[in-house]
Amino acid sequence: MPDGVAVDEPAEPMSKAKINIVFATVVLGMLMAALDQTIVSAALPSIVADLGSAGHMAWVVTSYLLAEAVATVLAGKLGDLFGRKLLFQISGIIFIAGSALAGVAGGMGVLIVARGIQGVGAGGLMVTSMALIADTIPLRERGKYQGALGAVFGVTTVVGPTLGGLFTDHASWRWCFYVNVPIAIIMVVMAARTLPHLRAVTRPVIDYLGIGLIALGVSSLILGLEFGGGEYPWLSWQIIGLFALAAVLITGFVLVENRAKEPMLPMRLFRSRVFTVSSVLSFIVGFAMLGSMTYLPAYLQYVDGATATISGVRTLPLVVGLFVTSVFSGQVVGKTGQYRYFPVVGMAVMAVGLALMSTMGRGTSVWLESLYMLILGAGLGLSMQVLTIVVQNTVPYADLGTATSGVTFFRTLGSAFGTAVFGTLYNSKIESALAQALRQAPGISPEVAANPKLLRELPLAQSEPIIDAYASSIDYVFRWVVPVALVGFVVAWFLPQVRLRDSSRHGAGDVGEGFSVPDSHDRVVQLERSVATTVRKARAQKPLIPELIAASGSTLNPDSAWALGQVYLYAKEQVPATVYAIAYRHRLPVEVLSPVFRQAVEAGLLHDDGGTLSLTGDGDAEVDKLRVGWRRWLGARLDDWNSEDPVDRALLDEALSKIAAKLLDQGADSGEVSRV
């Protein structure tokens, strides 16, 4: 696994304005990729009414999620291989192609394929977005940008169904996809102009066979679940064959991962009870969240007679519950380090929410339905927040990236399975229920019954049996998912309480962390996130310069340390260092800076050659001390990262030394070497 990136072409230090432009570019990519997970949920009834094939409705969501799950695994390594900028742009182009094809789809099959193409692009956009933040944002400022990116991911969960409803009601469901095209084109153009060219220092080893086996195995399993009982009987050779093929492929995946040089998902991780339990719970959270968010708008449109827009708005209680309890649990974990009972309570609350939702019907009030959704969302939020954090605290440094991305991978897989299983349960019930309802309402065609807008226009006496058929079918789905939440409740008791690293506790309360964004596989990126969180918290409490100078053993005063840092940075950039240039860069008067540099020259730390400054031997030695000071300071703050494995300890030491050098470089660039 690569331990950093190298620049393909020399890059000037980025100004604050350029950093913000880069961030805006990355946000556009994350926004579109995350939005399309949920934007179609409110549009699904209209899509079915237009294209038919109600039995394949779930695949509009499932194909996207499944392709995204596989793409997130590949994207990180391919970004290391070909450069993250190139992969970000290619992912954007793939997303454009999938969106355009989905918009013009004339049948459900074409739409499902288009959504799969979209998912491939979305997976690449999500993972490279997080990696590009790490590549371009100075380390000590990175925490707030990463938190903001996570918050964007969360906000799209809130607004996705509502936006989908607005497009469906006021234009066409096709605009859920068309709207991506111009935005993605702008994003690709911005990326070409603003993003730096970066590649991995070492050539990554990509586990193509393992990725291929798990992708095909999971696809076979979901196809079996999707087609069973509908397209084919459960005991037909087609369904049994799909399940058997899935078993063979997944078994092959396990065998390959045990022998791969750099496995996609190291099987040794499952020796850890924390990782195994967290992965199972993450799967269940994804299962319940996306499955329910996909079918709730359909319930609200068919049963309550809500428009597509209103159905999206009325799912907000679920997301509000998720958001509030995610933030609450994160704050508590950050302050106390105690997390074990959050997933236990969360799974129990989730089971209660699903059970209550299975009782909804034509006579249930809007307020009661909203309360049930709020309860379900609260359970999801209590469970979701801590799972990634606890895994990051128990795996060795060498496995930090794969373990972190592994937990979010299981959540995405759970989302795909949840949508598929919800669809299977729904399809198994709705066909017979609707046929019986149509017999009670003669003269109503199946096409009218499948169209929520036309159904709302029928007299209540005619529409009642059809509405009840939809209500009983969707209630049936929620009822059968209650046991899944109860399994999660039992599994959650096996999650052990471990002492959280301080750096992880500091980040637990960040809003963005609660939404489990698909993350980087690179362990250095994960370690730098912890470092950024630690530095940000330390800076908020008191100035760091006295501690850094003390840790370095230097006798420099703050002004001299800052001056040396500036000249050191210019030397690295191979640019002549003058007081005028430094003053211009930091928008400071020359008269203010001149005494600072004159003092360093008189102390023998800098050499002045006709106005061009350079480090003397003593100056070089002092800069080295500052770098050592950063390393010692990090070591003292991250001593809870200590590993018993000497190889893992050596990897961690090497990474921290590189991070210390980066902090020194970026501190000089920002003018904060001595004024942290």
Image: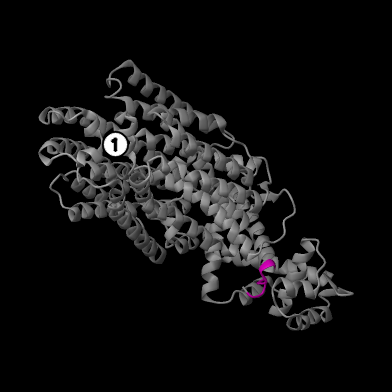
The colour scheme used to paint the residues is one colour
Q: Assign the magenta stretch its main secondary structure.
A: loop
Instruction: Give the quadrant of the C terminus.
Output: bottom right
- Give the extent of the magenta segment: 669-675
Percent of width and height locating residue 18: 63, 61
Q: Where is residue 418 in the image (x, y as percent from the top left)?
A: 33, 38
Q: In this view, does 388 lie above or below 241?
A: below
380 horizontally vs 437: left or right: right
Q: Say which residue appears at 33% left-offset and 46% top-offset.
A: 169
Relative placement, left or right, of 383 versus 212 is left
Residue 670 falls within the magenta-colored stretch = yes
Residue under circle 1? 422
Q: Quadrant of residue 454?
A: top left
Q: Where is residue 89 in the image (x, y as percent from the top left)?
A: 60, 44
Residue 307 vs residue 289, the one in the foreground: 307
Q: Is residue 82 left or right of residue 641?
A: right
State the residue lying farthest toward the right: 610
**Residue located 47% across and 52% down the image:** 392
What's the residue type where badge 1 is placed? Phe
Q: How crowded is mark 1: few (under 14 residues within 10 Å), some or many (20 or more)?
A: many
Q: Is residue 266 visible?
A: no
User: As drawn, which residue projects farthest toward the top?
Assistant: 237
Residue 476: quarter of image: top left
User: Considering the image in quadrants, where does the N terminus appear?
Assistant: top right
Residue name at image x 29 percent, y 36 percent: 422
Q: Which of 36 and 539 is in front in this view?
A: 36
The answer to which of 412 and 428 lies nearer the viewer is 428
Question: Which structural element holds mark 1?
Answer: helix
Q: Can residue 18 be seen in this view?
A: yes
Does residue 662 lie above or below 123 as drawn?
A: below
Residue 266 in percent (x, y) is at 51, 38
